[in-house]
């Protein structure tokens, strides 16, 4: 097969038109073109007419001559690599802590290499986790071990399942192919901005779990890492809480993929003297708009075309103050979710289903927070900074996990909530909203930066600064405020055998990059065993 890039196609193109387009690009007859496979397809909305830009692999007669003349290039199918199998079993089996993307992919790679890893997860399997999240929405009783943040699949299992990433390369492709093998829709292999959707992610997570088990790994749920056994600067074992009991397990290799909300784990590392450092993160609000309005702003007269689906956006600006303000985790046709993992805190996040057919669009609008804002040089000061504003949001919402909210018009005018403006967005946060002044649950530099940024974003995306847009607070878990330091061999710089991994360790961001980090850490661990 040969590969062709940047084919321009209309929204309603047919297979016949695609074949004709390939033939015209090559200067051959359409009847010489055989099977055509999509490699990538993205929306091109840069011009007045919205179109698709696609890359394809095609079977064509006389392929070698076309390649030699430079009219096409050879297509090399991607085959996801498998790790080299260990010649013998390790003395103690490696343990992987955390069943988010980083931990799942690290455990799968180790299992496929014959290392027989044990994957531990403080939360519930994804089936039971669904029930715990629904129970929180119904009763307002939070399960601190099984919620939007904790449980099989990690925080990403209850977001949009966005797989866009800036890392590129073989690692990213391996992640996508593995997800497809485990039940993700085939479209993720060629979509310009692939996503799985909250409704389909649980099945994919179960598929990853089964792949780990089939390869010789083991998975323990409801198991919390609460201590490490260390001798002469090297890991010798882990201390676990499981089934109401504390037990010790011998191991010399621990992949720490605990996630950015496992605050007790980072406190435990600090007490052990494991080197940590403060890390910048971001803080802000969830902004909800009418999805129809976002569609019109992005696609103009093409809005609503069935081939396009719900439009997304990506906005950012750098202010004279030096602060960055940007959109994060944009969920087309989605809803805002209650993402608290600790009692007496309100945290928001966003999710959408595969169809992205909800009436609202939502995204976090975040402001950069630097270590100098934390008010302390303590490595964990960023965690306390997060807690402060999460607790303030809880109090401002009324103390029952109702979220504080404000219409954008009131927020920009610095006025107390008034009656809802015309065409006001109806919020989707499941535990209800209390209309207040959001200045009371956000740092002053965050509210000042948001007030500067929204008019800028409104000029870039028509209607984004509409008075009826809804802001819900607070969003604090965009990334970890602490980094667990590691060396070139992926080990902690202060504890041999400890492999910090993924978002929680401050080493990745997003599903794909965290999963890719899990693969890299697993390979480094395997190399040490070899």
Image (spheres, rainbow, N blue to C red):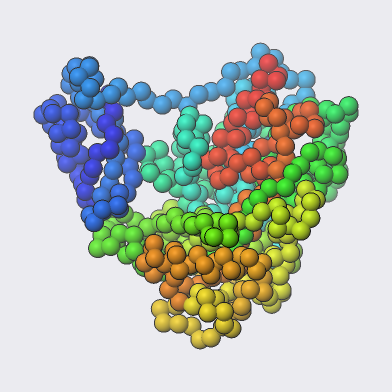
Image quadrant where residue 274 sits? top right
Q: Measured along the vertical axis of the image, is residue 414 above or below residue 17?
A: below
Residue 260 visible, this orientation: no
Q: Would residue 465 appear left or right of 257 to someone viewing this image?
A: left
- Residues 61 and 327: in front is 327
Q: Would residue 332 appear left or right of 436 to someone viewing this image?
A: left
| Most distant residue in the top direction | 87
Image quadrant where residue 311 sits? bottom left
Q: Would residue 76 appear left or right of 262 to someone viewing this image?
A: left
| Most distant residue in the front direction | 320
Q: Quadrant of the C terminus?
A: top right
- Residue drawn at x 45%, y 57% is 315
Task: Return the x and y of residue 217 as percentages of the image width and height.
Answer: 66, 30
Task: Return the x and y of residue 484 as percentages of the image width and height.
Answer: 72, 40
Residue 115 visible, this orientation: yes
- Residue drawn at x 48%, y 48% is 162
Image quadrant where residue 227 sits? top right
């Amino acid at each position: 097969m040969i590969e062709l890039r940047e084919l321009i196609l209309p929204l309603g193109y047919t297979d016949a038109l695609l074949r004709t387009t390939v033939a015209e690009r090559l200067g051959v007859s359409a009847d010489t073109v055989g099977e055509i496979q999509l490699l990538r397809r993205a929306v091109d909305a840069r011009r007045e007419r919205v179109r698709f830009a696609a890359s394809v692999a095609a079977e064509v007669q006389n392929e070698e001559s076309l390649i030699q003349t430079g009219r096409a290039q050879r297509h090399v199918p991607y085959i996801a690599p498998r790790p080299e199998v260990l010649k013998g079993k390790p003395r103690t089996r490696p343990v992987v802590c955390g069943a988010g993307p980083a931990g799942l992919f690290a455990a799968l790679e180790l299992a496929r290499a014959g290392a027989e890893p044990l994957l531990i997860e403080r939360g519930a399997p994804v089936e039971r986790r669904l029930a715990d999240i629904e129970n929180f929405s119904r009763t307002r009783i939070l399960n601190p071990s099984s919620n939007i943040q904790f449980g099989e699949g990690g925080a990403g299992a209850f977001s949009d399942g966005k797989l866009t990433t800036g890392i590129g390369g073989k690692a990213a492709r391996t992640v996508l192919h593995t997800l497809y093998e485990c039940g993700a829709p085939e479209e993720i292999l060629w979509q310009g901005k692939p996503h799985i959707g909250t409704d389909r992610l649980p099945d994919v997570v179960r598929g990853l779990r089964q792949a780990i088990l089939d390869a010789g790994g083991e998975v323990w749920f409801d198991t919390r890492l609460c201590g490490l056994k260390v001798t002469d600067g090297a890991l010798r074992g882990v201390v676990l809480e499981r089934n109401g009991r504390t037990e010790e397990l011998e191991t010399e290799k621990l992949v720490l993929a605990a996630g950015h909300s496992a605050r007790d784990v980072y406190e435990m590392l600090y007490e052990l003297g494991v080197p940590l450092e403060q890390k910048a993160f971001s803080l802000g609000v969830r902004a909800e708009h009418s999805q129809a309005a976002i569609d019109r702003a992005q696609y103009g007269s093409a809005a609503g075309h069935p081939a396009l689906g719900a439009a997304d956006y990506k906005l950012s600006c750098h202010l004279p103050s030096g602060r960055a303000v940007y959109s994060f985790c944009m969920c087309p046709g989605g809803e805002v979710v209650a993402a608290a993992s600790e009692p007496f805190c309100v945290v928001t996040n966003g999710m959408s289903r595969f169809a992205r057919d909800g009436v609202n669009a939502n995204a976090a609008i975040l402001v950069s927070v630097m270590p100098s804002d934390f008010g302390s040089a303590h490595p964990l000061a960023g965690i306390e900074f997060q807690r402060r504003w999460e607790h303030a949001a809880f109090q401002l919402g009324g103390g029952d996990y109702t979220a504080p909210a404000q219409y954008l018009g009131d927020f920009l005018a610095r006025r107390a909530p008034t009656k809802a403006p015309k065409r006001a967005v109806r919020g989707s946060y499941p535990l209800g909203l209390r209309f207040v002044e959001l200045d009371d649950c956000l740092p002053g530099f965050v509210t000042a930066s948001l007030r500067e940024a929204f008019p800028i974003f409104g000029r870039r995306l028509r209607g984004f600064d509409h008075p009826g847009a809804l802001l819900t607070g607070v969003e604090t878990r965009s990334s970890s405020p602490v980094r667990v330091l590691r060396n070139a061999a992926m080990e902690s710089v202060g504890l041999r055998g400890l492999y910090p991994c993924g978002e929680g360790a401050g080493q990745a961001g997003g599903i794909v990059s965290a999963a890719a980090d899990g693969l890299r850490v697993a390979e480094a661990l395997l190399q040490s065993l070899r």
